[in-house]
Amino acid sequence: MVSQNQQLEALQDIRRIMQRSSRFISLSGLSGIAAGIWALVGAYIAYDWIYEYYVSYNSEGYTGIAFQKLKLSLVVLAAAVLGAALVSAFYFTWRRANKNNLPIWDHTAKTLTLNMAIPLVTGGLLILALLRYNDWRFVAPLCLIFYGLALVNGSKYTLSEIRYLGICQIILGLVNTQFIGYGLYFWAVGFGVLHIIYGFIMWWKHERQSSNDMVIANR
């Protein structure tokens, strides 16, 4: 019986080693929660600005008294939200990797980054092209769709939950293409609410037990 248990533990150790070598498993659920909170804060600020400048949507696109001035502010706000989310993601991922004595920038992490960067860069260049021609109608849905494609493309190099988050983002973006005037709301749900839900699930499934063990050890 003891020998059988030892063999089972050995197989589990081998499985963990193989998983670490092929998948980046240091992603933290707290990163998703933080990114979602930043996205909701950004959406709230953007909504406040849009309401202040009386921006509306009609058959000719977004119009308003000061929309030209508002556009630059929205782009800067989006960049700030992205920057805050990336900093939060790096911090929580670094903390989890350090806790588990795992490298944060190994071959798997580089492969994951490359596979996510291809759809993200492609989508970003397409969105910039739309902005150049003053077409804002599909900016929000394209952000969701290409971000979802990036998550699905990179999911085979990290935790499987990322794939389901990506699929949800793609579906949400496609639905948004049929409700163009509500892009900010879809953006808030996709980058805000879904990230928080995903982050909590990730934390509950992969990090809660280690957090409880740490609390017990410190008593």
Image (cartoon, rainbow, N blue to C red):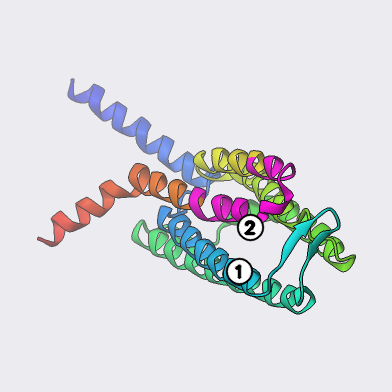
Q: Secondary structure at mark 2?
A: helix
Q: Nearer the viewer, residue 56 or 69?
A: 56
Q: Tell me if 106 is positioned left or right of 59 in this view.
A: left
Mark 1 → mark 2, Cα distance in angstroms: 8 Å
Magenta segment includes 36: no
Check disc 1 and report the residue beneath it. 46
Compare marks 1 and 2 and give the one earlier in the sequence.
Answer: 1
Discs 1, 2 touching: Cβ within 8 Å: yes
Give the percent coordinates (x, y) of residue 202.
Answer: 41, 46
Screen quadrant of the C terminus: bottom left
Q: Tell me if 105 is positioned left or right of 197 in this view.
A: right
Which residue is most to the left?
Answer: 219
Q: Nearer the viewer, residue 171 or 167?
A: 171
Check disc 2 and report the residue beneath it. 184
Q: Nearer the viewer, residue 15 or 24?
A: 24
Callout 1 amino acid: Ala
Range shown magenta: 172-194
Q: Nearer the viewer, residue 86 or 218?
A: 86
Q: Tell me if 163 is positioned left or right of 1 in this view.
A: right
Query: Residue 133 sits in which quadrant?
Result: bottom right
Q: What residue lies at 48% left-to-right and 39% top-to-bottom? A: 18
Task: Give the main secondary structure, helix, strand or loop, of the magenta stretch.
Answer: helix
Q: What residue lies at 39% left-to-right and 64% top-to-bottom? A: 95
Q: Which mark is residue 83?
A: none
Q: What residue lies at 43% left-to-right and 55% top-to-bottom? A: 28
Q: How many marks?
A: 2
Callout 2 amino acid: Leu
